[in-house]
Image (cartoon, helix red, strand yellow):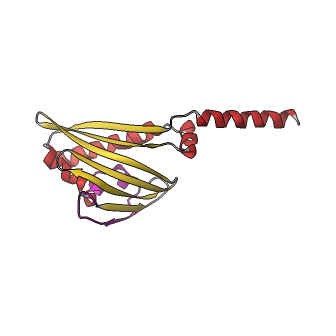
Amino acid sequence: MSPILLAVAFIAILFIVVIAGRPEEFTVARAASICAPPEKIFPRVNDLRQWDAWSPWAKLDPNAKNSISGADAGAGATMAWDGNRKVGAGKMTITESQPGARIRLRIDFQKPMQATHTAEFTFRPEGDSTVVTWSMAGKNNFTGKCFGLFVDCEKMIGDQFERGLARLKSVTEK
């Protein structure tokens, strides 16, 4: 076996070992304080038709095709999207809705990679404001682990959450 082929095989094995050793799960969370009570903010998140006003992904592809189905708001409400390579394609469904407290969603990504994650919004009153926390958690498959070697996913998703929370704040405090 040639030394070059041996070196390539060694690098490939090392690469696989490094990827396999990456975390099995991830969590990304960001929070913002919004000068409004939870009952004023909650409907903007609980009704998927209102997401265009504040969602950071709506701004990345204004021409994305969105469709809403299921319940009008709360548990069972579903939004499917298909957009450019920045937003990809997928579907999210509200699986839990506790008025003024929590909204949990199941997100099924189809493009650019297939994955299923859970997102959650919590609303915690704090004086005259509400601290809104937006988080997403999921499992890292082999492809996700490999992607994470080259892209800081926590920062990439976290930056979008920060933009979305800032827009949610702006829309709510108007």
Residue 151's x, y, as percent? 53, 39
Is residue 114 rendered magenta in the image?
A: no
Indicate left or right for 72 with 140 as reference: left
Which residue lies at the image location 55% right of the left edge and 34% below the top edge?
Answer: 22
Give the magenta range. 51-76
Q: How many marks?
A: 0
Quadrant of the image occupied by residue 120: top left
Residue 167's x, y, as percent? 27, 46
Name, please, the residue furthest toward the left.
Answer: 128
Q: Is residue 162 above or below residue 54?
A: above
Q: Is residue 100 above or below residue 150?
A: below
The answer to whether residue 63 is seen in the rendering is no
Which residue lies at the image location 77% right of the left edge and 37% below the top edge?
Answer: 9
Quadrant of the image occupied by residue 130: top left
The answer to whether residue 129 is seen in the rendering is yes
Residue 145's x, y, as percent? 55, 40
Which residue lies at the image location 77% right of the left edge and 36% below the top edge?
Answer: 8
Residue 83's x, y, as percent? 44, 60
Is residue 60 rendered magenta in the image?
A: yes
Indicate left or right for 112 with 131 as reference: right
Q: Quadrant of the N terminus?
A: top right
